[in-house]
Image (cartoon, rainbow, N blue to C red):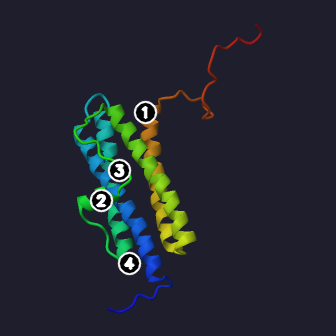
Amino acid sequence: MRTINIGLTEEQRQGVANLLNQDLADAYLLLVKTKKYHWDVVGPQFRSLHQLWEEHYEKLTLNIDALAERVRALGCYPIGTMEGFLQIATLKEHSGDVPTATGMVANLVEDHEQVIRNLREHIDQSSEEFHDEGTADFLTGLMEEHEEMAWMLRSFIEGQELQPDGNKPATGSKTPVGV
């Protein structure tokens, strides 16, 4: 086989592939959980959550493919089994657990936020440790997508009243002017 000559050593490419495989494992677990919640959600929020999660799992499916292809572009192989994913994922399954709609949203927020923290770390490692700016840029794009999905989910459960300027109203009692 021809040696890959893209400006990264084999060790650098493998180090980045290891990071990408962990991100792939987390994305796959998040996809499975999102689909499960899409199927199981009930209650007054059914339609809005069902549609939102469909959008999210479609985006996650595209991201999974992009992660696996990035690993291949570096001359390595992506993990492709549930056993492999479960061994290296930082996210955890909630086997047998069917929470309320709000509980489902909260679980997905936690998972997206964990993925975001991992991606921040992997962006730094890709750039500083492995000198792979291409992967750092790729991961930055993925992180931004997870930030948007987490924001949408958080917005669903926060339900805080906002003033027209976007600030939260002051808490406590208010004294009328001139009293």
Residue located beneath label 4 in the image:
73
Along the viewing direction, whichever of 62 and 92 lies nearer the viewer: 92
Q: Earlier in the sequence, mark 1 or mark 3?
A: 3
Q: Nearer the viewer, mark 2 or mark 4?
A: 2
Q: Earlier in the sequence, mark 4 or mark 3?
A: 3
Q: Please tell me which residue is depicted at 31% across the width and 53% down the height of the picture.
A: 29
Q: Earlier in the sequence, mark 2 or mark 4?
A: 4
Give the left or right position of residue 107, taking residue 178 as reference.
left
Q: Residue furthest right?
A: 178
Task: Estimate the x, y position of residue 35 in percent, counting from the top left.
Answer: 26, 47
Helix, strand or loop at mark 1: helix
Mark 2 vs mark 4, CA separation in Å: 20 Å
Q: Residues within 10 Å of mark 1 (few under 14, many from 20)?
A: some
Q: Residues within 10 Å of mark 4 (few under 14, many from 20)?
A: few
Along the viewing direction, whichever of 160 and 102 lies nearer the viewer: 102
Q: Are marks 4 and 3 in contact (CB under 8 Å)?
A: no
Q: Are marks 2 and 3 in contact (CB under 8 Å)?
A: no
Q: Nearer the viewer, mark 2 or mark 3?
A: 2
Which quadrant of the figure has residue 14? Answer: bottom left
Q: Indicate which disc residue 85 carries.
A: 2
Q: Are marks 2 and 1 in contact (CB under 8 Å)?
A: no
Along the viewing direction, whichever of 26 and 90 lies nearer the viewer: 90
Q: Earlier in the sequence, mark 4 or mark 1?
A: 4
Q: Image height check: is 71 above or below 124?
A: below
Q: Indicate which disc residue 56 carries.
A: 3
Q: Please tell me which residue is depicted at 25% across the width and 32% down the height of the picture.
A: 42
Mark 2 vs mark 3, CA separation in Å: 20 Å
Q: Are marks 1 and 3 in contact (CB under 8 Å)?
A: no
Q: Indicate which disc residue 157 carries.
A: 1
Which quadrant of the figure has residue 164? Answer: top right
Amino acid carrying label 3: it is His
